[in-house]
Image: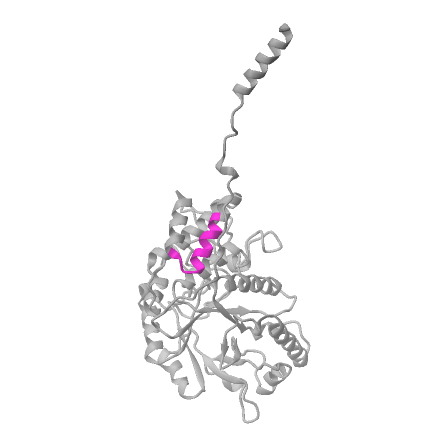
Amino acid sequence: MDIRMTIWLLWAVFLVGCKKEKPTSDTNKETKIETFEPVAVTKANAMKVWVHYMPWFEDKATSGNGKWGQHWTMANKNPDIIGADGKRQIASHYYPLIGPYASSDTDVLEYHFLLMKYAGIDGILIDWYGTRQLYDYPQNKRNTEAIVAVLEKVGLQYAIVYEDQTLRDGFDSDAQRLSQAVADMNYLRTNFFNDGHYIRLDGKPLLLTFGPQIINTPSGWNTVFNTLVDKPAFFTLYNHSHLANNATYQLATGEYIWVDATPMETKYARKHEVPQLIGGAYPGFDDYYKEGGWGEQVLGDIDHEDGALFDRSLQMATDENRTQLQLITWNDFGEGTMIEPTHEFQYAFLEKLQDFTGLPYNKAILEQIYAYYTLKKQFADQPEKQKQLLQAFYYLISLQHNKAMGLINEIAN
């Protein structure tokens, strides 16, 4: 055999012997997501529980001006300043467990609504500032739309609390104010009232107003609602329904309770004066307006009593045979009425709700939801981890909480 041919054959044999299979890598494996529809929790207590929800929080990335939103800063606080305890400086006596946040942050909204779901809250009542291009109203409107999108994924309901005080500034006449209110109602009709997740009472879309404060005549509210074919079940603040009802017009379906210095017994006495009264429960009141440079206190402090006040107000709603209850509030940190988990109270208020609503869950699932949120932020730039966390989300909304907890622990470890 030719020497060159012999060398070539030997080289070929060597190359074949050196050839190895390509190693497999876990990085080539993709998480397959199994999707599930949301499942409602089973509650022993049939009372419908809603929670008043503020959509007005902004961080530097969402505010539009590179600054923290005013509801974290008021006039004199700077969340960029971080104390020795690791907390940002915010305009509140209380600190959210996850720190200050943006109301349009999907991770935050999932965290909020999953906590609500596993605490027995049926839905939220969104404090809404209308459609005007004024102050921070456009951001509130944008945030509300983001809130509704996530809320529906979790399987909760919602309704709007209309702030007619937004009609105070920038108008020359009451006619202009009414015209803006009509535009706001038409927006609600087009975007929310016909949504399957929107709360309906007796077949009508639920609408609350914080007051009213500006439109204070029944004829005015008749003008506002006149263009709506589907008239709302309209609730005013307690002792305010006369501003929407008279001998000619009966626009208010009922009233709802709010936190102030009036004894709760006096507020509940309104149930004999109006067709329907939505009950109220709150954990306390401790506003930051004076310290934050926003004027004097609007109400004297109401001691949280380490949760005892919340217990009594929940029990009173039961004693008064209420079928609808508004919790005041989820996240008004400026007034200290929040039941959202904080460093000060942890999960105490949500644990009380689990007992009140008669759920088979406890603090452990709330802690796992917090862990879910922290992992979402920790692995924000890792797509594969995000897919695993999405699977955990589907487990949580479909009440497969044991699977969710196992997966969350696996990712954390």
Q: Which residues are magenta?
A: 388-401
Q: Nearer the viewer, residue 32 or 393?
A: 32
Q: Quadrant of residue 216?
A: bottom right
The quadrant of the rendering that contains the N terminus is top right
47 magenta-colored: no
* Residue 168 visible in the shown view: no
| Rendering coords of residue 298 (x, y %) | 46, 70
Q: Quadrant of residue 259?
A: bottom left
Residue 103 vs residue 303: left or right? right
| Rendering coords of residue 342 (x, y %) | 40, 57
Would you say the magenta stretch is mainly helix, strand or loop?
Answer: helix
Please tell me whether residue 83 is drawn above or below residue 104 in the rendered image. Answer: above
Residue 320 vs residue 91: left or right? left
Instruction: Farthest residue to the bottom: give it.
Output: 247
| Rendering coords of residue 409 (x, y %) | 38, 47
Residue 130 vs residue 26: left or right? right
| Rendering coords of residue 235 (x, y %) | 50, 80
Display colour scheme: one colour
Q: Quadrant of residue 217?
A: bottom right
Q: Nearer the viewer, residue 378 or 33?
A: 33
Q: Nearer the viewer, residue 24 or 249?
A: 24
